[in-house]
């Protein structure tokens, strides 16, 4: 999608600190880290929001979760970690290319702000 920063990262047009990558997805460090470990997991395909994902994309969405789990293992987040998906402006979504936040290395409050 032209103008989408995460599509540009997925295509290598914009530099990022890549942690893991396969044919469907990519994990890279968040540029504005909110935890000692803060990694974003994105599909290479442009899907703007969870609300707009189709049934056919269910496998891809599951793949993102499994990549988050693998990265958490690789990063030794043995004390626990949080996976967040912001859907829509009111939830705090600012980049409209679906992504999981994987955060760890500290404790987290519940409920989140
Ligand atoms: P959202 O608020 O949409 O759930 O999360 C977007 C996240 O993307 C934010 O945490 C923000 O710091 C991160 N982000 C925005 N632009 C860039 C970028 O160009 N590179 C990287 N690595 N992260 C970005
Ligand atoms: Zn995109």
Image (spheres, rainbow, N blue to C red):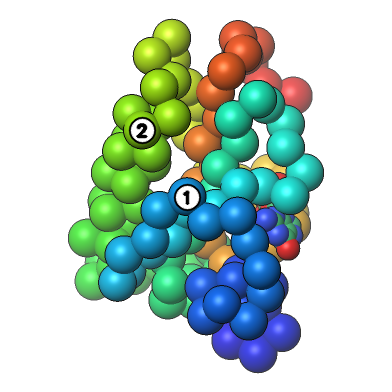
Q: Residue furthest bottom?
A: 2
First in residue order: circle 1 vs circle 2: 1
Q: Which residue is mark 2?
A: 74
Of 48 and 80, nearer the camera is 80
Query: Is the residue 89 above or below the residue 96 in the image?
Result: above
Of 1 and 75, nearer the camera is 75
Disc on res. 100: none
Residue 47 position in % (x across, y down): 48, 72
Query: Is the residue 113 above or below the residue 6 in the image?
Result: above
Q: Residue at x 72, y 31 (%)?
A: 34
| Disc 1 secondary structure class | strand
Q: Is residue 41 visible?
A: no
Q: Are marks 1 and 2 in contact (CB under 8 Å)?
A: yes
Of 53 and 84, nearer the camera is 84
Q: Which residue is mark 1?
A: 19
Q: Residue at x 43, y 29 (%)?
A: 75
| Disc 2 secondary structure class | helix
Q: Quadrant of the N terminus?
A: bottom right
Q: CA distance from mark 1 to mark 2?
A: 10 Å
Residue 28 position in % (x across, y down): 55, 53
Q: Residue at x 63, y 81 (%)?
A: 13
Q: Is residue 81 visible?
A: yes
Q: Residue at x 72, y 37 (%)?
A: 33
């Amino acid at each position: 999608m032209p103008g989408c920063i995460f599509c540009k990262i997925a295509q290598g047009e914009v530099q990022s600190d890549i942690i893991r990558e396969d044919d469907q997805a990519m994990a890279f460090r968040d540029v504005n880290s909110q935890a000692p470990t803060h990694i974003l997991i994105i599909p290479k395909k442009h899907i703007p929001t969870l609300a707009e994902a189709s049934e056919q994309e269910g496998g891809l969405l599951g793949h993102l979760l499994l990549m988050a789990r693998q990265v958490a293992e690789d990063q030794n987040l043995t004390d626990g970690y949080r996976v967040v998906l912001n859907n829509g402006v009111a939830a705090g979504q600012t980049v409209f290319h679906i992504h999981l936040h994987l955060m760890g290395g500290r404790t987290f409050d519940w409920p989140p702000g």
